[in-house]
Image (cartoon, helix red, strand yellow):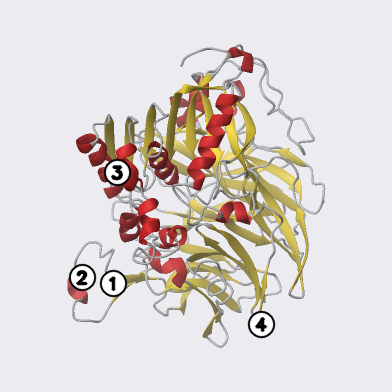
Amino acid sequence: MGKAYPIYKLAVITAGLLFTTSYSMASDLSHQITTDDFFDIGGMSSVQLSPDGKRALWLESRWDKELDKSQQDLWTVTTKTRQTTRLTFTNESESSPQWSPDGTYIYYLSKITHEDKQAPFNGKKQVFRISHNGGEAVPMTKEVEGVSAFSVSSDGNSLYFLTSKTVKDEDLWAGMRASHDKPEYAHGERKTNPLYKLDLQHFKQQLVLDDDKVVWQFSVNNDGSKIARITTADNELVNLEGWSDIEIYDTKTKTSKVLADTAWREQAPSPYGWLLGLDWHSDNQQLAFRIDFDGHPGKLFVSNTTKGSLLEITRPDDVTLSAANIHWRPNSDEICYLGADHARVKLFCTQVDDDEQGDTRTVIKGDLVIGSYSFSHNGKKLVFSHNGLDHFYDLFLADANSRRAKYKRITNINPQVDSWILPQIQIVKWQAPDGTSVEGILDLPAGYKKEDGPLPLIVQIHGGPTSATPYALQHRSYGRSTFTAKGWALLSPNYRGSTGYGDKFLTDLVGKEHDIEVKDIMAGVDQLIADGIVDGDKMAVMGWSNGGYLTNAIISTNTRFKAASSGAGVFDQRLQWMLEDTPGHVVNFMQGLPWEKPDAYTHGSSLTHADKIKTPTLIHIGENDQRVPTGHAQGLYRALKHYLNVPVELIVYPGEGHGLSKYQHR
């Protein structure tokens, strides 16, 4: 388990990386990766390029032991000199940064509490503004209930923002229900989101729209004539999942129109889709938006809100749409979006002319795992965050026009990694029992060679399942790089149902959970054993969320693993449909409701097969997890501890949800 291997310098060649920087891998690779290193890694998100392309900003997250949480601050870099500046130092995480159109200011959401607890310093999220050079942040709003989202107008003169108000239902029992802390599975009161407009010249505020709707996202077109909103009548996530609408509000006539949803409801493979990602073209008419489905490929649409036409964008082969950040490239007719493609995440731009789709291009070539991206005001420059094989997310600058765009790295927010002894990361392929080609990411100890003999194996399974493990360096609190540092091999299989391998590969899992993906994973394990890389007598399996579900599935269908760690994993599909906050997920994969498909719910539950479990198991769950409620962990624990006599431990993390937000719990 602690076997050491000779260390040699690994040459990592990434297609498209056509330059040499000071951020190259250090020659002195001396640091063995430890669990504690996880807490020293900075994360990067929400990258935004200034209008003139001379500066870029991002949100950088760091774990803070004293605050017992991860902390997110605002940073900038000058693209020419690569000089970085930290702009915020609060104890609360900043979010949603946006440049002013002239590049003078940066607007963002934050919450600050003063002793008197009066707005804007009442601990609720407010919009703040800070100079791009730094200095004191100035609050722009002072809403008693805080601000959930905002947008600066294209001329920089106005600030649109959503606040919150409580609407009580009018019926006999409304008062009784509303008096309870959280009527999560009933009704009684709703939090709706009025939209306001603030004049940034005179700081006069006016109500734009209040129709008692819950607003999940909004977008204002360039001339302020139309406002797009994703709305539901209720705050429950179950209503966002399949019952959400896109509404277009005309600010001149003060009327709203709901976009006809036939294309993404009635004609979709599932009615349970999540609308997301609104973005207006500069012509003030075309609105781009996305919808995602559990178990099915997401869709991208462009609606001409004046003509009433709708265009569905066809994706490149094998590509699955990824994330919500879709953007029209400025000064062009290209709609741009991220797509998962064989364990990479790439940026694609598709030409749209007169309601017809034109050419689609991959903006940056190479083995990229892009997190977020942004264009300059003229559309010629592009910044993006990228997680590579020898670094975590960092900022890169590229030419957005070129079909052979070169890119250069302009930040190094984790310089400590330059001295790390990194794992060997490679893509491995195998065949499933039905002949389907399956891939996974294999991490091996630095310096390991096949002639050194077989290694103990950790199978680490990604969540989702409509997701994928990327071809990139990762170090999580829940495994990955720490295992290779201790002499383990680690396999992260992108099993059937994973994104980036074509629509059929994705949808093959529907109706076959607890079966086809388990066979995919075990076929990969068997291939590594046959190749002499893995010792079949020294294997463990772990995962979180759907990875926890599949950990449960694997140990309930075979006894080949010596240990298992099941994090927030479903144990019973009926219980999951009854209790989780997004029941459409279960309906999609079971292909019906519990009373319609009882056999599917039975077969898809590890509870049904629990008597086969012999593997010692560690179970993790958040006390307040609404995505995979605690009953699943309790049921698995009860079965193993009291009825099956299998070594087991259950850890319930106080106050946590589906992920672990506290430092001590991580």
Task: Tell me if mark 2 has few (under 14), some (14-19) or many (20+) residues whose alpha carbon lies within 10 angstroms of its own.
Answer: some
Q: Are marks 2 and 4 in contact (CB under 8 Å)?
A: no
Judge whether 91 appears above or below 356 on screen. above
> Callout 3, which amino acid?
Ala
Q: CA distance from mark 3 to mark 2?
A: 29 Å
Badge 2 vs badge 1, beta-carbon distance below 8 Å: yes
Q: Which comes sooner in the sequence, label 2 or label 4?
A: 2
Q: Earlier in the sequence, mark 3 or mark 2?
A: 2
Report the disc number at residue 189.
1
Q: Which residue is mark 2?
A: 177
Q: Is residue 42 visible?
A: no
Residue tagged by mark 3?
Answer: 633
Viewer-nearest residue: 445 or 173: 445
| Residue position for label 4 | 306
- Label 4 to label 3: alpha-carbon separation: 51 Å
Which quadrant would residue 433 be assigned to in this image? top right
